[in-house]
């Protein structure tokens, strides 16, 4: 089975009930890490309580299976005030990680956005940097900026470059 599954990918526009069902299904198959695309359209429409309830529902399901919940904020669609508010919501809910991008949005990972996330999140919420990470130097820069994990489709390339 997969070690991690992304739900609501890539735009975060699935019905909440469908997401809960998807999460229940993959948890039932042994997956313990869920990356969930934040419901940014609901947030931008002002339905903050729906977003809060969505986080609580997902977290409850994941924690029951001793899993990790990583929430993808797709930061390229959020201004600084929205980013701070969504980070606060994630932290208050108790998510394990905030991830900056699906890799399909308008902004990938860079040191500036990772520093912003680190400034908006308590140390208890880890950060996964993702989106366009192509070199070991870039990965190390993101870690120095506050990322705890790196998401890249070039992991073997980054590791092999280090070994050679």
Image (cartoon, grey):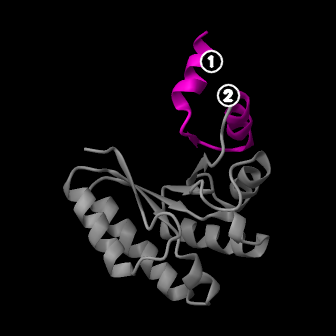
Give how far across and how far down residue 37 sits, in percent: 50, 66
Given residues 68 and 24, the one toward you in this image is 24
Give how far across and how far down residue 38 sits, in percent: 53, 70
Given residues 26 and 52, the one toward you in this image is 26
Question: Quarter of the image holding residue 151?
Answer: top right
Q: Magenta segment, principal secondary structure?
A: helix
**Residue at 74%, 43% in the rendered image:** 145
Question: In the rendered view, would you say 135 is above or below 50?
Answer: above
Question: Quarter of the image holding residue 152?
Answer: top right
Instruction: Name the residue carrying label 1.
Output: 161
Question: In the rendered view, would you say 86 is above or below 7?
Answer: below
Q: Is residue 84 left or right of residue 21?
A: right
Given residues 141 and 62, the one toward you in this image is 141
Which corner quadrant holds the N terminus?
Answer: top left
Q: Secondary structure at mark 1?
A: helix
Q: Is residue 51 left or right of residue 119?
A: left
Instruction: Name the residue carrying label 2.
Output: 136
Q: What residue occupies the far left of the structure in this picture?
A: 28
Disc 1 crowd rating (10 Å Cα; few below 14, some 14-19, many 20+) is few
Label 1 with label 2: CB-CB less than 8 Å: yes
- Span of residues in magenta: 136-164
Disc 2 crowd rating (10 Å Cα; few below 14, some 14-19, many 20+) is some
**Residue at 71%, 64% in the rendered image:** 76
Q: Does the magenta run of residues contain 101?
A: no
Question: In the rendered view, would you say 17 is above or below 63?
Answer: below
Q: Disc 1 and disc 2: Cα gap in Å? A: 8 Å
Of mark 1 and mark 2, the one earlier in the sequence is 2
**Residue at 77%, 46% in the rendered image:** 111
Q: Does the magenta run of residues contain 149?
A: yes
Give how far across and how far down residue 24 sits, in percent: 25, 66
Give how far across and how far down residue 89 sits, in percent: 58, 73
Q: Which mark is residue 125?
A: none
């Amino acid at each position: 089975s997969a070690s991690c599954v992304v739900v609501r990918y890539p735009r975060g526009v699935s019905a909440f009930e469908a997401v809960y069902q998807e999460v229940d299904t993959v948890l039932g198959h042994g997956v313990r890490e869920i990356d969930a695309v934040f419901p940014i359209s609901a947030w931008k429409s002002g339905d903050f309580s729906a977003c809060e309830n969505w986080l609580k529902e997902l977290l409850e399901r994941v924690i029951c299976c001793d899993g990790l919940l990583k929430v993808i904020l797709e930061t390229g669609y959020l201004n600084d005030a929205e980013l701070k508010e969504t980070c606060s919501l994630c932290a208050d809910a108790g998510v394990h990680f905030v991830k900056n991008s699906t890799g399909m949005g308008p902004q990938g990972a860079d040191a500036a956005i990772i520093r912003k996330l680190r400034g908006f999140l308590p140390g208890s919420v880890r950060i996964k940097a993702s989106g366009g990470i192509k070199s070991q130097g870039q990965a190390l820069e993101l870690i120095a900026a506050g990322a705890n994990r790196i998401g890249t489709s070039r992991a073997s390339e980054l590791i092999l470059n280090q070994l050679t």
